[in-house]
Image (spheres, rainbow, N blue to C red):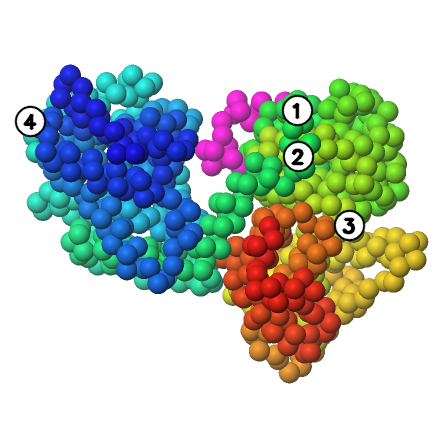
Amino acid sequence: MKSIRLETDSDNIVHLIMDNPNASANVMDRDFSDSLQSAIEQLKQKDFSGIIVRSAKKTFFAGGDLKSLYAAKKTEAKAFFASCEALKANLRWLETQGKPVVAAINGAALGGGWEIALSCHHRIALEDHSVKIGLPEVTLGLLPGGGGCIRMPRLLGIQNALPFLLEGKQVRAKQAQESGLIQQTATDTEDLLNKARTFIQENSHESLQQPWDKPGYRIPGGDAKNPKNAQLLMVAPAMLEKKTRGCLPAPEAILATVVEGSQVDFDTATRIESRYFVDLACGQVAKNMIGTFWFALNELKDGASLPQSARQSETTPIRKIGILGAGMMGSAIAYACASKGIEVVLKDISKEAAQNGKGYAENALQKRLARGRTDEARMQAILSRIFPTDNASDLSGCELVIEAVFEDRGLKAQVTREAETQLNSSAIFASNTSTLPITGLAEASERPNNYIGMHFFSPADKMPLVEIICGEATSDETLAQAFAFVLQIGKTPIVVNDSRGFFTSRVFGCYTNEGIGMLSEGINPATIENAASLVGFPVGPLAVSDEVSLTLMGRIRQQTIKDLQKEGKSIPTHSAEAVIDHMLELGRSGKAAGGGFYSYPEEGKKHLWQGLQQEFPPAKQPPVEDIQERLLFIMAIETLRCYEEKVLRSVREANIGSIFGIGFPPWTGGALQYINQYGIEAFIQRAQRLTEAYGERFSPPEILMTLAESKQDLNDIK
């Protein structure tokens, strides 16, 4: 057996030890399945008093073999289904053979790891921060296929199980015990094994059964036909549809598995689960999500796209940071840093403004306190790390300074020079600009080698992405330290090269402009917003423009015009510009101003401004599919242009950045993966039709033509 070994102790207890020899964690791969089969065959021949299932790794079990799942093909579905059923048959033997089986959970037990634990009669977890329990498969477009959809409802009841299954909810050991997932916690490894042995010794003379195998068993709260559950399940599909817009098949498959599985015997239920699991794993959406949210994300966090010299540079955790500008962005960055234990100097033009900026953190923490997500001591500790000031000398000792002032080149130059007089020679200065090229901003710096772009997204304490932009003079050492800092505060960094708008703002602007421009064509505003929602965008282009503010859009455009005129370059135009100007003339600049494309009543939900129909009279409506694909295609094509122009360094950063930063639909796997899964030739043909109907901006880039000729896709060039 490669991945499992059996050891029998002096109490005749068999220790089924999971120990993958080829990896740092146990995974449910072919070796594990074969090893489990061999272990079960041996156990059938042995006389033992009980079994302890444990791990020789730091984690209990990492989950499924995503490489195999990513490679699963529909043509191999029958064999795939058989292998799933074989694995589950062995887990089923563990829980039905009669002798006590204990899961000794020493670390994370997620996905397949938790499904192994569920097949044990008794579960004990180490009370340690490393222990996480849950079923996160839905986040990768899958469902728990090792019995999780069947055992969880039978253990907790349908309503209590659904958050774990549909949302991928994860809990620590204490929460798991309170939820009824585990029966005991342990203080250390020795205590863990002692408690496992004790349970077996106390129950070795009984024929143990799982609750769902005992005569007269009923699912807690009843099956799907129970009136309370039936009421929930009547509205659940509509709630899912509202949340996923039908773009994510996994939640629907999970709900179907739970409902159908609750009404049949256990073995039939597991076959139902296997069928849905195989269908999802062989589908394109799961492949899109696994490729991006697992493989690409892990490679990115490991620094795969950093130059070799940056990867070899020594970095140290940032202990003290300065934030220039206590507006919403600067205040949120300050809160994000203080939450991770970093001392923050929050500077603005007045002490009062800086103090108001600190209030952002206080308000956010008060909400967490009210919801039981933090305590008073932790809240005060975080707030004590934020020092509001109007004095530049307080920046002394900061290892990193981030400016988050208005998108004005002169203002940014002023605060850069003021701050640098207080910093030592190794300190890094970063601009949170969303559009202005870093090389130009660095001209105000005495140390352009230490100058870098660090573009956060609003709200900065919640959004997971930071776009790091290298200017022409930015050193690899500065890049390495900036990259490490972003990871330090728990966010995902992507690294791009310098350009106006960089990657994210440039592509995001295409999305908002396309939606706003449709108003000038007479397209119904509700149709624009609904088309975006139906294809998986979290926020429609009109709504998100209100959030950003049309005033800011206008200011960025004016700064761009000035810069391009100075450089002697032509100034691009878009039909959205006339719409924005007209809305500003009407005094409707966005949410912060009380109204934009939407109205924001003091009581009740926001809604599209009724005056839009009068200001932009409706014309003949195009097919909804055209509206959807215009929004998708314009972002995908502009992303590809960024890659072609070497603004983007890799396909993985394009995909991660487009989803985490600017809301490209997750089911696609990202803007460039959307092109891959659409098919290169099919995408070119559709882009050409959109070009004929709506303009040259949809013209497919040359790189696509080259890929089509060579029969490659974008994964071949990453």
Q: Is residue 229 visible?
A: no
Q: Amino acid at mark 3?
A: Ser
- Say which mark, if any, is on residue 499: 3
Mark 2 or mark 4, which is nearer the start of the sequence? 4
In the displayed orientation, state which residue is furthest to the front: 710
498 above or below 303?
A: below
Quarter of the image for residue 261 reads bottom left
Q: CA distance from mark 1 to mark 3?
A: 28 Å
Residue 376 painted magenta = yes
Judging from the image, what secondary structure is the residue with disc 1 in?
loop
Q: Amino acid at mark 1?
A: Glu
Quarter of the image for residue 37 reads top left
Mark nearer the viewer, 3 or 2: 2
Residue drawn at x 88%, y 36% is 444
Q: Would you say the residues marked 3 and 2 are in contact, meaning their CB atoms lie under 8 Å apart?
A: no
What is the span of residues highlighted in magenta in the rendered image?
367-385
Which residue matches tag 1?
314
